[in-house]
Image (spheres, rainbow, N blue to C red):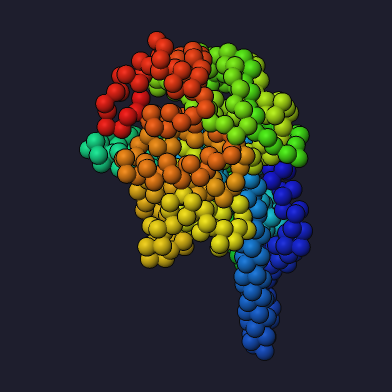
């Protein structure tokens, strides 16, 4: 995993090399301060060379200044490399998320996915920079000082570094101990993100049902769990790292004691002892960085596994590859189609089929309406046409060609999809429309707004078509959002239209405006519509009546209303209602 991370730095060899060279040169200068201390003691003082005070001091200050300049440049180079790597991986991960099947998202919380993009990516890329910068500099610094100490006095050097093997063993086993606990901490943090995301997304429901105490309780529980998981890691560190410091600092006492004895017995100079005293700080400075570095590495490797778990997943099948017919008439045919959301082959729970043995044909340019009780499978059929999911049995054909052989990207370009809860991005109206067809002209945008009965209210907005919609289009009413969604579908100008309960939640006045917009949208297109309004269904060329996932009747309104059956029952159950709906 670490090697895979480090290979990413190879995408930017010049920046990685700059960080490496600056670390090497800057680290080599750590020898200057111990050497200056020895020179002052043994030469300037020992030989009574007053003339060497200023030159020696200037030499030391100059070397230290150079080291700080190189450190500044190294920090900038390392940050530039890190931020570039973070940006690239975030884009790669986001692109991958867009190429995963819808079923994958069904079983994962949005907050948990956001945590991987927002938190895990910087954590894993930090490992690369720390490896090239801090860890490399620490290894170089330790090696240089160690060699210098053995050259000066190998006996005193042995005493100085005696605690290091024990520290190495403790660090190794602690790293193995802490990694699973960092993983638990990361997962708890992701769960906290998910809880927060759900609470913010549902803030209106929480307020409407005065559910603030319960929401606070859920968030508190998630936060406490995250705190507990993090504290498990911190408790281990609170025990291990003071013990390591004890071993390291015991080494300096033993080194000073032996060094003092050797100076008193004329076995070494006082300057060499001072060299060891100054050098000790530099040799154990890398050891002091083991704790923060181990945190960075453990968290980064855990984060890397979570990120690569997504990146390494196969793309949604046939997203790009597949047939791309030159023309589309728009005939859709269902042949004994069955589907279950609980497909065991994809980690499901083996739930009963949402639709079973559906066989029907929607002729080109006609409207087929699906009606039935809640849970009858109406929306599922539209999901299957868009290939958000694949049938477990049977097949769906477009102009005689099985959908399974078509490119999903091409197929979805032929569809206009308008749902009951129209989704608008937190961007301008213009940007929301251009999602359907990038590069559309100003005249084309206003033309579809006119056709969707949306131009009037858009012109009245302070910033017109450049007005921000707000999160999920919160700045607009349900009818306004629906008309903007219809305008977006009109801009796509698709041969096939999918309408999923597009007017069920609207008042009569707004519904009339939306219905007029839909008439523009449905003209000369194959349309599959799910509706609760009788006014929407009555004009359909054929009505498919679903019950328990099965097709129980098929015909036009006049045919179905004249015979006993579920359709007439649904119509009679809502007869005289304000909206004339099912």
34 to the left or right of 247: right
Q: Depth check: 258 or 215 in front?
A: 215
In the orientation shown, which residue stands out farthest toward the left?
210
Q: Position of residue 242 (x, y in %)?
A: 48, 45
Q: Position of residue 175 (x, y in %)?
A: 58, 38
Q: Position of residue 342 (x, y in %)?
A: 53, 19
Quadrant (top left/top right/bottom left/bottom right) for the C terminus:
top left
Can residue 79 be spotted in the picture?
yes
Q: Residue at x 38, y 28 (%)?
A: 534
Residue 357 falls in image quadrant: top right
Q: Position of residue 468 (x, y in %)?
A: 43, 58
462 up-or-down from 578: above or below: below
Total labels: the figure holds 0
Q: Depth check: 431 or 116 in front?
A: 431
Can residue 188 be spotted in the picture?
no
Residue 482 falls in image quadrant: top left
Q: Depth check: 128 or 90 in front?
A: 90
81 up-or-down from 205: above or below: below
In the orientation shown, which residue stands out farthest toward the bottom?
51
Q: Residue at x 35, y 37 (%)?
A: 505
Q: Residue at x 64, y 42 (%)?
A: 413
Q: Residue at x 55, y 41 (%)?
A: 523
Quadrant (top left/top right/bottom left/bottom right) for the N terminus:
top right
């Amino acid at each position: 995993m670490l090697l895979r991370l480090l290979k990413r730095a190879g995408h930017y060899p010049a920046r990685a090399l700059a960080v490496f060279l600056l670390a090497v040169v800057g680290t080599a200068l750590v020898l200057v301060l111990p050497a200056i201390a020895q020179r002052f003691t043994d030469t300037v003082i020992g030989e009574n060379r007053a003339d060497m005070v200023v030159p020696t001091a200037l030499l030391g200050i100059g070397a230290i200044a150079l080291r700080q300049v190189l450190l500044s440049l190294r920090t900038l180079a390392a940050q530039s490399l890190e931020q570039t790597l973070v940006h690239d991986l975030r884009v790669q991960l986001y692109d991958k998320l867009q190429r995963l099947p819808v079923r994958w998202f069904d079983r994962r919380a949005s907050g948990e996915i956001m945590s991987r993009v927002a938190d895990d990516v910087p954590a894993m890329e930090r490992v690369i920079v720390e490896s090239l910068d801090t860890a490399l500099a620490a290894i170089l610094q330790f090696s240089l000082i160690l060699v210098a100490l053995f050259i000066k006095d190998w006996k005193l050097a042995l005493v100085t570094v005696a605690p290091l093997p024990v520290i190495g063993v403790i660090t190794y086993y602690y790293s193995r101990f802490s990694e699973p606990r960092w993983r638990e901490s990361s997962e708890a943090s992701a769960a906290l993100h998910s809880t927060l995301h759900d609470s913010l997304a549902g803030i209106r429901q929480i307020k409407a049902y005065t559910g603030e105490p319960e929401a606070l309780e859920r968030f508190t529980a998630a936060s406490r769990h995250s705190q507990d998981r993090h504290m498990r890691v911190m408790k281990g560190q609170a025990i291990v790292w003071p013990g390591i410091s004890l071993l390291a600092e015991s080494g300096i006492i033993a080194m000073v004691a032996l060094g003092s004895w050797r100076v008193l017995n004329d076995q070494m100079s006082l300057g060499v002892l001072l060299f060891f005293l100054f050098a000790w700080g530099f040799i154990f400075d890398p050891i002091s960085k083991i704790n923060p570095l181990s945190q960075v590495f453990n968290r980064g490797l855990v984060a890397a596994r979570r990120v690569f778990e997504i990146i390494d997943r196969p793309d949604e099948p046939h997203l790009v590859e597949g047939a791309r017919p030159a023309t589309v008439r728009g005939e859709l045919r269902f042949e004994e189609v069955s589907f279950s959301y609980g497909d065991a082959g994809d980690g499901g729970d083996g739930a009963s089929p949402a639709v079973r043995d559906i066989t029907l044909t929607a002729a080109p340019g006609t409207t087929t309406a699906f009606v039935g009780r809640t849970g009858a499978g109406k929306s599922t059929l539209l999901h299957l046409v868009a290939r958000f999911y694949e049938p477990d049995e049977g097949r769906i054909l477009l102009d005689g060609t099985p959908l399974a052989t078509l490119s999903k990207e091409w197929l979805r370009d032929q569809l206009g999809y308008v749902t009951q809860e129209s989704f608008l991005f937190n961007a301008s109206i213009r940007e929301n429309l251009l999602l359907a067809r990038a590069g559309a002209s100003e005249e084309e945008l206003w033309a579809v707004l006119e056709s969707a009965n949306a131009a009037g209210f858009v012109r009245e907005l302070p910033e017109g078509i450049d007005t921000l919609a707000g999160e999920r289009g919160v700045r607009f009413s349900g009818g306004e959002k629906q008309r903007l969604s219809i305008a977006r579908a009109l801009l796509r100008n698709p041969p096939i239209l999918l309408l999923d309960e597009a007017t069920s939640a609207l008042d009569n006045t707004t519904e009339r405006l939306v219905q007029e917009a839909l008439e523009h949208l449905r003209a000369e297109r194959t349309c599959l519509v799910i509706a609760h309004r009788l006014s929407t269904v009555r004009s359909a060329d054929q009505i498919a009546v679903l019950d328990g996932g099965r097709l129980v009747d098929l015909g036009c309104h006049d045919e179905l209303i004249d015979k006993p059956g579920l359709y007439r029952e649904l119509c009679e159950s809502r007869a005289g209602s304000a909206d004339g709906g099912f």
